[in-house]
Image (cartoon, helix red, strand yellow):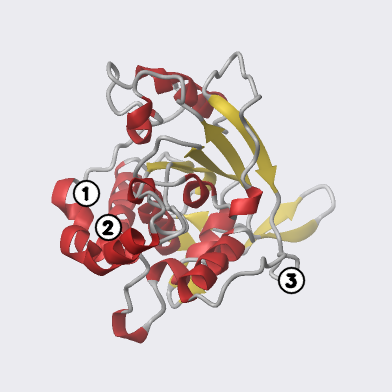
């Protein structure tokens, strides 16, 4: 819808069974793909990323690899006859504008009803954590926070800081805006809390909200960044995964987010909310078109 203002490149490097290789491997592929696009189109000046589901985690990994630290440039001010140092970090050498995820499990998929089709039954959630790697391979381990490569913390925990040569959080801060679109219900794959980066007690009341222009947008919130000292840690049980989830919420809250909550409760295809929210099929999932329109209308250029 913005052909004269943006070039849209749909990633092709993590299709089909390649999505089982792990968030890190897919992130490396995406980072290399982005660099190839930049090389083919030397006139590019800005970059934005829009990602759905686990693609949001892949995109977060990729930008950590694409982050370029600020480069000092001496710029002459002819009026004052002085020289100023201008510093600016980039993503692959480009100015970072929009980082948008749609139904992405930012807090992982383990426990606490993060995967709704497990019905919040603790036994089901524990069993899923034990067998998920048989089905979803390394990606499953990353999502269920059971990976421990070479004794390292789980990948999603590493991704809430600048870890080794990956500048995950510095890269997120580089973007002018960060946005999460989340299904409040009927998404049986990715729960509301994990996709909106919230604790249970932070979930908003949305039922009475009406948005005539975007009928399926039921709540919007701008959350400012918090320093580690400012984050109010909630009281949690002595459970490793509960503590780990709290660390993820706290870590990701150190940057500001725009949070957009979406409901398809009254739609024919509500049970396919995970696909409707991104209009995966223009015929079957057209009820989600207003969500995409909202994304376009608020897209910074």
What label does residue 26 carry, if any? 2
Residue that label 3 marks:
229
Which of pointers 3 and 1 indicates the residue nearer the eye?
3
Residue 21 position (above or below residue 206): below
Task: Locate residue 261 relative to residue 188 in the image: left or right.
Answer: right
Q: Is residue 79 left or right of residue 60?
A: right
Identify the residue at image location x=52%, y=49%.
193
Residue 23's spot in the image, x, y percent? Answer: 31, 60
Which one is nearer the viewer's eye here, 297 or 245?
245
Verify CB contact (< 8 Å) between mark 3 and mark 2. Answer: no
How would you rate the neighbour count of disc 2 (Cα within 10 Å): few for under 14, some for 14-19, many for 20 or more? Answer: many
- Locate the C terminus by quadrant: top right
Secondary structure under badge 2?
helix
Q: Which residue is mark 1?
A: 13
For the residues marked 2 and 1, what is the alpha-carbon distance in whole angstroms?
8 Å
Q: Quadrant of residue 126?
A: bottom left
Residue name at image x 38 percent, y 49 percent: 119
Q: In the rendered image, is residue 70 in sight?
A: no
Residue 95 screen position, x and y as percent: 53, 47
Q: Is residue 213 above or below residue 216?
A: above
> Which of labels 3 and 2 is toward the front?
3
In whole angstroms, how far apart are the C-alphas of marks 3 and 1?
Answer: 40 Å
Label 1, secondary structure: give it. loop
Dot 2 and dot 1 residues touching (CB under 8 Å) = yes
Q: Return the disc, 3 or 2, that comes first in the chain's sequence.
A: 2
């Amino acid at each position: 819808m913005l052909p004269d203002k943006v070039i849209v490149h749909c990633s092709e490097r993590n299709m089909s069974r390649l999505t089982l290789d792990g968030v890190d491997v897919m992130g490396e592929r995406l980072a290399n793909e982005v660099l190839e696009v930049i090389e083919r189109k030397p006139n590019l000046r800005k970059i934005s990323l829009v990602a759905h589901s686990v693609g949001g985690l892949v995109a977060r990994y990729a930008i950590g690899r694409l982050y370029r630290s600020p480069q000092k440039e001496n710029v002459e001010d002819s009026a004052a006859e002085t020289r100023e140092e201008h510093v600016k970090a980039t993503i692959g050498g480009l100015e970072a504008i929009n980082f948008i995820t749609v139904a992405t499990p930012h807090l992982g998929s383990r426990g606490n009803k993060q995967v709704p089709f497990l019905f919040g039954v603790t036994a089901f959630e524990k069993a899923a954590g034990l067998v998920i790697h048989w089905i979803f391979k390394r990606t499953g381990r990353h999502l269920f926070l059971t990976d421990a490569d070479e004794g390292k913390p789980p990948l999603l925990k590493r991704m809430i800081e600048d870890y080794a040569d990956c500048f995950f959080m510095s890269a997120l801060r580089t973007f002018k805006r960060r946005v999460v679109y989340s299904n409040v219900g009927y998404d049986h794959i990715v729960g509301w809390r994990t996709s909106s980066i919230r604790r249970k007690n932070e979930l908003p009341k949305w039922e009475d909200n009406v948005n005539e222009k975007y009928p399926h947008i039921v709540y919007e919130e701008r959350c400012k960044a918090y320093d580690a000292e400012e984050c109010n840690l909630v009281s949690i049980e002595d459970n490793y995964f509960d503590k780990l989830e709290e660390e993820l919420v706290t870590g990701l809250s150190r940057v500001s987010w725009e949070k957009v909550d979406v409901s398809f409760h009254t739609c024919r295809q509500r049970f396919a909310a995970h696909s409707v929210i991104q209009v995966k099929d223009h015929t079957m999932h057209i009820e989600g078109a207003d969500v995409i329109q909202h994304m376009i209308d608020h897209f910074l250029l």
